[in-house]
Image: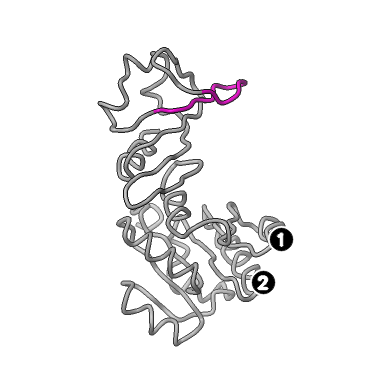
C-alpha cells in the first residue's frame, strides 16, 4: 500500500532556503513525517542534523521525484525561492505525478499566476506568512491561522457538523473543545460577533480562539 493511502501525515518539502527549512522544522514539531529535498549538497548536509529525512536531488526531474517516492505523498510543498524556473518546473513535475495537494511558494503575483497555471493548488507568499502559520494551514482544515506568542491562536474554520443547528449556549464549545467561538459567517451573510444565541448552519464559517493544540483539534472536527 502506498504512503499516499496508508499515512496522510507525510509531507515533502522541496527547497531548504530560509522559508523551506523553517517550514520543514515546524511541520516536524507538529508531529508530521517530513521528507526534505534540496539540490544543494551543503544545505542537505547542514539540515540533515536537524531533520530526519533530507536528500539531495534535482526536483525539476520527474524521474528523480518518482525514485524518491514523492508520488506517494498527498501533500508536497515547493519552497524554492531563488529560481523561478526551478520552482515552475518542479510544480509541473509534481502535477505530472498527480500529487493531490501541491503547495508552492511565489515571489510575485506573476510567479503565482504561472504556478497556478502549471498545477499548483495553493500558492503562498512567505514574505507575508510565517513558516509556522503555513505549516498549520497545510496540515489542518483551517482556512486561516494566526499564532500569538507561544500558545495562543486564532483560526478561521468551516463549522463542524456537530455544531450545526443548536445555539452556542447549548453546545458550550469552551467546555467541550476548549475554544471560544468569537465570530461567525452564515451562508449569504456577513461576519458578525457570535453570542450564546447564535445558531450555526451547514456551510457556516467560524472564528475561534484558544491555545494552539485546542484550535488545531477543533479544526479537525470538520
Question: For this view, does 16 lie left or right of residue 162?
Answer: right
Name the residue at the front extreme: 149
Residue labelled with disc 2: 84
Few, some or many C-alpha atoms within 10 Å of disc 2 (few <14, some 14-19, many ≥20)? some
The range drawn in magenta is 181-192
Judging from the image, what secondary structure is the residue with disc 1 in?
A: helix
Residue labelled with disc 1: 114
When asked about the image quadrant of residue 88, the answer is bottom right
When asked about the image quadrant of residue 3, the answer is bottom left
Q: In the rendering, at what x and y percent does residue 4 appear?
A: 41, 55
When asked about the image quadrant of residue 119, the answer is bottom right
**Residue drawn at x 49%, y 22% as measured from the top left:** 202
Magenta residue check for 64: no
Up the image or down, 204 lies above or below 99; here it is above
Question: For this view, does 97 lie left or right of residue 74?
Answer: right
Q: In the rendering, at what x and y percent does residue 160 appear?
A: 40, 28
Q: In the rendering, at what x and y percent does residue 124 appear?
A: 58, 56
Name the residue at the bottom extreme: 42
**Residue drawn at x 41%, y 65% as measured from the top left:** 24
Q: In the rendering, at what x and y percent does residue 154 appear?
A: 42, 40
Judging from the image, what secondary structure is the residue with disc 2 in?
A: helix
Instruction: Pick whichever, 155 or 159, lies toward us.
Output: 155
Amino acid at each position: 500500500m502506498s504512503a499516499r493511502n496508508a499515512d496522510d501525515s507525510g509531507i515533502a518539502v522541496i527547497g531548504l532556503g530560509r522559508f523551506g527549512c523553517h517550514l520543514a522544522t515546524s511541520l516536524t514539531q507538529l508531529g508530521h513525517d517530513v521528507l526534505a529535498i534540496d539540490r544543494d549538497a551543503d544545505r542537505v548536509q547542514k539540515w540533515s542534523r536537524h531533520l530526519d529525512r533530507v536528500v539531495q536531488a534535482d526536483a525539476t526531474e520527474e524521474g528523480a521525484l518518482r525514485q524518491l517516492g514523492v508520488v506517494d505523498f498527498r501533500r508536497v510543498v515547493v519552497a524554492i525561492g531563488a529560481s523561478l524556473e526551478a520552482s515552475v518546473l518542479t510544480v509541473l513535475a509534481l502535477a505530472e505525478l498527480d500529487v493531490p495537494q501541491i503547495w508552492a511558494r511565489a515571489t510575485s503575483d506573476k510567479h503565482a499566476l504561472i504556478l497556478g497555471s502549471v498545477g499548483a493548488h495553493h500558492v503562498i507568499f512567505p514574505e507575508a506568512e510565517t513558516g509556522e502559520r503555513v505549516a498549520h494551514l497545510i496540515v489542518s482544515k483551517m482556512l486561516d491561522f494566526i499564532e500569538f506568542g507561544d500558545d495562543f491562536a486564532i483560526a478561521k474554520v468551516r463549522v463542524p457538523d456537530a455544531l450545526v443547528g443548536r445555539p452556542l449556549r447549548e453546545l458550550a464549545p469552551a467546555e467541550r473543545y476548549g475554544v471560544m467561538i468569537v465570530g461567525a459567517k452564515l451562508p449569504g451573510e456577513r461576519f458578525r460577533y457570535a453570542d450564546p444565541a447564535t445558531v450555526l448552519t451547514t456551510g457556516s464559517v467560524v472564528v475561534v480562539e484558544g491555545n494552539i493544540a485546542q484550535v488545531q483539534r477543533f479544526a479537525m472536527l470538520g
